Image: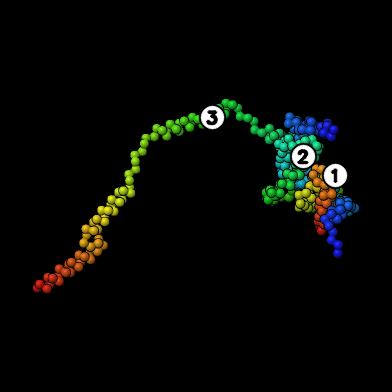
């Protein structure tokens, strides 16, 4: 019953299985959301692009393990989060890339509706600070924080995506929120 | 002092609303963060097309090589192998290398034999001649 419902809502899935011929539809449907999530997690547009591609590649290779119990969006999100957590190994490379390229321009695109340049600059600084702080959080806390505040996902959905209890999700979120608040207070 | 068990702590955390009275500053910061992420993730349609094509190309893997190319590679390999074997078989047999060790032993034996035949060892030849000369001189003087 549940599988049937998922099928009707998800193109590219039939009988709880991913249809290889229709994989393009799945990519088209989810690539923007996966990219946005990964960008929030890694704060590097090139890396977010690479990880998005890797996410779909991994999804295709492991398509046999998708049984249709969960929504395909949840399944893809889980893969993306795992990839972002695994990426910790290549952090040194990212550090050098950032050093060579200068400050990430992602934050500079925000707050363009500010009234004055000062306000805009302040907003950019604050957003940069919060993003930096999020980047320093441990993997699971970062993922929970991003899913909750950037993706506005409900706690139970975060729990099912990350295969955790709702209580554990709350604990991660509590720690992450406290860390970000402390940082903001210190900055103020 | 009563120590809290892990379960107590867990219950306490679970009971805590993760968003309790978010102060306005944090609320604003989080909203800014969300906007920043969304703005940064906005890309032109071309970007998504390129990404999709790249994913699908990777998914499809490399296209299989045409049969004629595979046949050509195999033929060339086999040809080189046969030519190599032919060259190795055609090479003339090399003459046996002279036994250098045997010649060296022979020379050493001759040297030893010569040394045994000598009255004095070779380095003392000059001294031996001098002594003989001196002996001859003294015998001449005494004869006078």
Inspect this view and state whether residue A92 appears.
yes
Residue B104 lies, in percent from the top left, at 31, 50
Packing grade of label 2 (10 A; few <14, some 14-19, many >=20) is: many
Q: In which quarter of the image is residue B89?
A: top left
Residue A156 bears which disc, if any? 1
Q: Which color scheme does this rendered protein use?
A: rainbow
Name the residue beneath numbered marker 2.
A76
Name the residue beneath numbered marker 3.
B74
Q: Does A22 sit left or right of B83 as displayed?
A: right
Packing grade of label 3 (10 A; few <14, some 14-19, many >=20) is: few
Q: Of the residues tagged 1 and 2, which is closer to the observer?
A: 1
Q: Quick one: which residue is furthest to the right in this view?
A: B21
Inspect this view and state whether residue A119 appears.
no
In the image, residue A23 above or below residue A124: above
What is the distance, in whole Å, between disc 1 and disc 3 at their CAs?
A: 59 Å
Residue drawn at x 54%, y 28% is: B72
SS under mark 1: helix
Residue A127 lies, in percent from the top left, at 81, 50
Q: Of the residues tagged 1 and 3, which is closer to the observer?
A: 1
């Amino acid at each position: 019953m549940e599988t049937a419902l998922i099928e009707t809502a998800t193109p590219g899935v039939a009988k709880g299985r991913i249809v290889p011929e229709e994989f393009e539809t799945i990519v088209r449907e989810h690539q923007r959301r996966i990219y946005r999530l990964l960008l929030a997690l890694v704060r590097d547009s090139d890396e977010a692009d690479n990880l998005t591609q890797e996410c779909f590649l991994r999804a295709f290779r492991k398509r046999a393990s998708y049984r249709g119990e969960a929504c395909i969006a949840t399944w893809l999100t889980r893969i993306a989060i795992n990839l972002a957590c695994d990426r910790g190994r290549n952090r040194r490379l990212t550090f050098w890339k950032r050093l060579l390229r200068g400050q990430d321009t992602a934050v500079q695109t925000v707050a363009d509706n500010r009234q004055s340049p000062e306000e805009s600059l302040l907003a950019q600084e604050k957003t940069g600070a919060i993003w930096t702080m999020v980047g320093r959080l441990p993997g699971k806390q970062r993922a929970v924080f991003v899913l909750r505040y950037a993706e506005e996902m409900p706690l139970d959905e975060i729990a099912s995506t990350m295969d955790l209890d709702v209580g554990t999700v709350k604990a991660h979120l509590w720690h992450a929120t406290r860390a970000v608040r402390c940082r903001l207070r210190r900055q103020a | 002092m009563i120590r809290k068990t892990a379960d107590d702590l867990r219950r306490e955390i679970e009971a805590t609303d993760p968003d309790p009275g978010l102060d306005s500053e944090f609320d604003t910061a989080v909203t800014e963060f969300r906007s920043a992420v969304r703005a940064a993730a906005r890309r032109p349609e071309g970007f998504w097309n390129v990404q999709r094509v790249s994913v699908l190309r990777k998914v499809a893997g490399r296209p299989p090589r045409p049969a004629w190319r595979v046949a050509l590679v195999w033929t060339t390999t086999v040809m080189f192998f046969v030519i190599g074997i032919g060259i190795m078989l055609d090479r003339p047999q090399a003459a046996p290398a002279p036994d250098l060790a045997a010649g060296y032993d022979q020379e050493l034996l001759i040297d030893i034999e010569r040394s045994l035949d000598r009255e004095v060892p070779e380095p003392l030849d000059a001294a031996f001649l001098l002594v003989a000369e001196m002996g001859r001189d003294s015998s001449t003087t005494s004869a006078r």
